[in-house]
Image (cartoon, grey):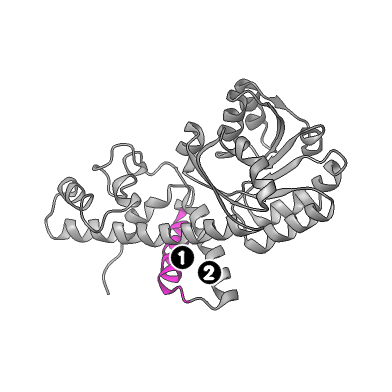
C-alpha cells in the first residue's frame, strides 16, 4: 500500500481520495475548503494544513484541480510542489482536466527534476467518482503508466494509456467536445418529439435500440422521465456542471484554433453552454441545456 498526498478535494477529488483510503492506502489531503478536509477525515484520511504538508513523505502525489492555471500554480509556482518533493521522488499524477500545453509544461518540469508524471483526466462524473468506476485517460511514459495504474485502479474501472505527455488531456478534450455536441442533439430530438405529440418514454425506448442511441440518451437522458437516475429527474443537480462543460468545450476550441481543425458543431454547442451559464444555470448539470433549449423560439 502507498502513502498518497492528494491536492484538491472537491466534488470529484473527495470521493476519489475516499476510495484510495478504502483500498488501504494512507491518504493525506489538502483543500482550501475546511468542509472538504473534514470529509476526508470522516473517510479515514488525514487533513493536512497545507499542500506542502500533504505531500511530504508521499509515494504518490495526486492533484485534482479546476483549471490549468491552478495546476501550474500548485506544481510550479505558489506551492511549487515539484521542488518540494524532488528529493523523495514520488510518482506525480494530475487528474485535472486542463489544456494540453499546461499538462506538457508541468510534466516537462517534473521530468527535469527527475520525477515521473502522468496527466490522467477522468470521465464518469461524481457518480463514477463515488462508485470507483471512473475512466482514466492517461498520458505519460510507459514506465510511469505501469507505476500509476495500480493506484488509478482504486478509483476507476477503465484505465487507458493514451500516449506520451499531454495525450490524456487531448483525449479528454475530444471526448467532452463530442459529449457536449451529443447532448445538444439528444435534447433537440426530445423537444421535437414533444412538438410532434410523441411520448418521451416511448421515444427513449425505441431510440435506445436504434441508430440514434448514445450514452447521453440511454444513461443520461436530458428530458425528465425516461431515465430515473438522470439529473433531469433531480432538477438537473450535478453530475457534471454546465460551467465545467463550457470550460472543456472552450479547451477544445482553443485546441482546434491552434491546430486548424474545423469544429463548427462544437463552436455552436459552446455558445449554447455559454448561454446556459449566463442564464444562471452554470452550477446545474450540463444536461440542463435541454431546459434552456426548451425556452428558445425558432427563428
Which residue lies under the disc numbered 2? Answer: 253
Label 2 element class:
helix
Quarter of the image that includes the N terminus: top right
Q: Residue at x 16, y 60 (%)?
A: 195
Mark 1: few/some/many CA within 10 Å (<14, 14-19, 20+) = many
> Does residue 276 sit above or below 298 in this rendering?
above
Dots 1 and 2: beta carbons under 8 Å? yes
State the SS at label 1: helix
Q: Residue furthest bottom?
A: 260
Residue mark closest to the camera, 1 vs 2? 2
* Percent position of residue 117, x then y: 72, 49
> In x, y percent, where is residue 284?
44, 47
Q: Which label was assigned to residue 209?
A: none
Is residue 296 among what the camera can see?
Answer: yes
Question: Can you give x and y, in whole percent of width and height, for residue 55 in the image?
Answer: 78, 36
Q: Tell me if I can see residue 294 in this picture.
A: no
Relative to 194, 6 lies left or right: right
Residue bearing mark 1: 270
What residue do we see at 70% from left, 56% from top?
Answer: 69
Point out the stretch of residues depicted in magenta: 262-280
Amino acid at each position: 500500500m502507498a502513502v498518497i498526498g492528494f491536492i484538491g478535494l472537491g466534488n470529484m477529488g473527495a470521493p476519489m481520495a475516499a476510495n484510495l483510503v478504502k483500498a488501504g492506502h494512507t491518504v493525506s489531503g489538502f483543500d482550501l475548503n475546511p468542509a472538504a478536509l473534514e470529509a476526508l477525515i470522516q473517510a479515514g484520511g488525514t487533513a493536512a494544513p497545507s499542500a506542502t504538508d500533504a505531500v511530504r513523505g508521499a509515494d504518490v502525489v495526486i492533484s485534482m484541480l479546476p483549471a490549468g492555471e491552478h495546476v501550474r500554480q500548485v506544481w510550479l509556482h505558489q506551492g511549487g510542489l515539484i521542488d518540494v518533493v524532488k528529493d523523495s521522488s514520488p510518482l506525480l499524477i494530475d487528474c485535472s482536466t486542463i489544456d494540453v500545453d499546461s499538462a506538457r509544461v508541468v510534466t516537462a518540469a517534473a521530468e527535469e527534476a527527475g520525477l515521473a508524471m502522468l496527466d490522467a483526466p477522468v470521465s464518469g462524473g461524481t457518480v463514477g467518482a463515488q462508485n470507483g468506476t471512473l475512466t482514466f485517460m492517461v498520458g505519460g511514459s510507459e514506465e510511469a503508466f505501469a507505476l500509476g495504474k495500480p493506484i488509478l485502479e482504486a478509483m476507476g474501472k477503465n484505465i487507458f494509456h493514451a500516449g506520451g505527455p499531454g495525450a490524456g488531456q487531448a483525449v479528454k478534450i475530444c471526448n467532452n467536445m463530442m459529449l457536449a455536441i451529443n447532448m445538444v442533439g439528444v435534447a433537440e430530438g426530445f423537444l421535437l418529439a414533444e412538438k410532434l405529440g410523441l411520448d418521451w418514454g416511448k421515444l427513449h425506448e425505441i431510440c435506445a435500440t436504434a441508430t440514434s442511441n448514445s450514452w447521453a440518451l440511454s444513461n443520461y437522458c436530458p428530458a425528465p422521465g425516461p431515465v430515473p437516475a438522470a439529473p433531469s429527474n433531480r432538477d438537473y443537480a450535478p453530475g457534471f456542471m454546465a460551467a465545467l462543460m463550457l470550460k472543456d468545450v472552450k479547451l477544445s476550441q482553443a485546441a482546434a484554433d491552434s491546430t486548424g481543425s474545423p469544429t463548427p458543431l462544437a463552436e455552436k454547442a459552446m455558445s449554447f453552454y455559454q448561454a446556459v451559464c449566463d442564464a444562471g444555470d452554470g452550477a446545474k448539470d450540463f444536461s440542463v441545456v435541454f431546459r434552456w433549449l426548451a425556452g428558445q423560439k425558432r427563428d
